[in-house]
Amino acid sequence: MKISLYVLIILFCLSCCTQNKLEEISIQLDKETLNPVRNPGEKGTLRVTGHYSNGKTSDLSLSDIALSVRTVSASGNVEVVALSGDQLIPKDGGLAEVTAVYQKDGATYQAKKRVVVAPYYRDYHQTLVLKLFMGYDGELNEPDPNNVIFQKEDPSCLCTFAQALDVVKRVDNLTRGIPKIIYLVGWQRGGHDHLYPDWSIVNPKLKREEDATALESLRWLICEARAYNTTISLRINMVDAFEESPLWDTYIKNDIIARDVNGNLKSIWEYVKGHRAYHLSYTKEWEKGFAKKRIDNLIGMVPELKEGHTIHIDAFMAYWQPENRPLSPWHAKPENGGIDMYKEVETQRKIFKYWREKGFDVTGEGIFWAHPAGEGFVGLQPMSWWFPADINFQMVVPERLSARGRTHRDGQGDFRFGSSMQGEEIFQKDKDNLPGFLSQFCTMTLPWYYLSRLERVAFIDDALYYSDGVVARVEDGKNIIRKGDFILRENDNLFVPALWNENEIIAYSAEGYDNRSWRMPEGWEKVSSVDIYSITMNGSTLKQSAVPVKNGLLMLTLEKEEAVSIVPAGIPLH
């Protein structure tokens, strides 16, 4: 009897030991994204958890664990995060990875966890960023049938500041109040690509009649646009210089303008007759103190810009790609400073950080373009148009760290990763009627906004798997984005929650359809009927009221290129 009891006790203990065997460890972070710009002094806290065979978990003592952290992606490969006990201390922008190693009972366990340091003032992965072309003085040097601007009656004044506010209102209606940033192109005297490096003269042709100066009109527009979920800012340039610039003689005197290998000034292009463009050296301008000076002067001239916390630097290149040479071959010579593209990039990083110090994010025209191999300004530049198609980069670097605008000049880009829009070509063509704007917004920005809130988990067999059970892939020849049975996209038929508004879905169809059933998303289980509003430039109008939802399905009919907002019945539209 005693022996049997003893055996049972032994077997029970062995069973408990087996059930309580450590199977794996994991790293838990209280914050997976740190933002030292918006939250000064912010730190993260980590803990390491053991997972046992009986399904239980417990936190392990960090004194028994080896911890390390490395930079995964950051401009200049800087230190992104430092470890101090259980604290993660942000050091610079980028992506880092924490590794934990734990040994017990002759076994070694390892866990990894990534943390983002996004030192930005704005959330570009949740913002529609656009460009609005205002004007361009001059006559084309050579005929360009693809240039819509110079086919207009007066290219020098395509959109005044007063007209720009009308554009802002129409766009806000079409986009259902999504947060927006619009950069003005050609806001300076002479319009697009004039006066650089000077930024001190606002284009008088854009002035409102009731204002004394064009500067007053610009400042008025910035303030008025805020009521329409829109930040107005400026598209500027820090690499080009023109002979008509008020700063030309000063920059020549201080040896800032780029020169060829023989020390001669060399124009790089002349798109408009008699209007030759030259490059300057970022490094020479920085060393002479002029870069900071013109940044400070612009902010002082238009203080309203600071509330928007964003500026767009066009063509922020580090070498002249068409000729595969430094910006200034003369200054690249060792005896003249050795300012090659690598030194120019070092200066560009200083420029990014100075703008940040002054309260601004700097967005750009591209990454991995006209820079040293692998330089994407990760952790410095929060958003870029013409985003690279590199799948590995997109799987590693999350959207909240490096967001995309429109990725391709033609088409919608890769629907699995998403692409936003730019709008500039639409505004140039017809700023009053905005042809194609609603289509681009619904087929590109709308699904991109939804996907950008999620983590990209895996790319397998051409399917992109996201967190929260979302997958984007081709099914039976159709471009599909789904979350289980909930279909967000089938080709150019969209049915996507407008997550910037509460309890709203936007549906759109490129070709139209009759009586199609859509499954409602999570959170709409108790909604028995909906109101449907047509989306137009002039606002949203009620199309149908109290449309029934049966068994979680909504029957919907849309015309070609029609978009509607769907809200629970009786709830006012936002």
Image: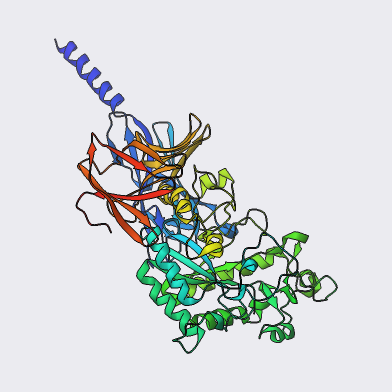
Compared with 536, 6 (above or below) is: above
Residue located 58% across and 51% down the image: 408
Looking at the image, the residue that sits furthest to the right is: 262
Q: Position of residue 314 (x, y in %)?
A: 60, 67
Choose between 440 and 22: the one closer to the eye: 440
In which quadrant of the rendered image does the C terminus lie? Answer: bottom left
Colouring method of the image: rainbow
Q: Position of residue 216 (x, y in %)?
A: 46, 84
Total numbered badges shown on the rendered structure:
0
Q: Position of residue 49 (x, y in %)?
A: 34, 41
Left or right? Give the position of 572 relative to 138. left
Compared with 145, 13 (above or below) is: above
Q: Answer yes or no: is residue 196 visible.
A: no
Q: Answer yes or no: is residue 46 visible.
A: yes
Q: Position of residue 559 (x, y in %)?
A: 40, 45
Compared with 421, 9 (above or below) is: above
Q: Residue 139 lies in what quarter of the image?
A: bottom right
Looking at the image, the residue that sits furthest to the bottom is: 212
In which quadrant of the rendered image does the N terminus lie? Answer: top left
Q: Residue 518 lies in what quarter of the image?
A: top left
Left or right? Give the position of 495 relative to 15. right
Left or right? Give the position of 24 relative to 385. left
Left or right? Give the position of 147 relative to 451. right
Looking at the image, the residue that sits furthest to the left is: 1
Compared with 180, 157 (above or below) is: below
Choose between 146 and 54: the one closer to the eye: 146
Choose between 348 and 547: the one closer to the eye: 547
Q: Residue 552 lies in what quarter of the image?
A: top left
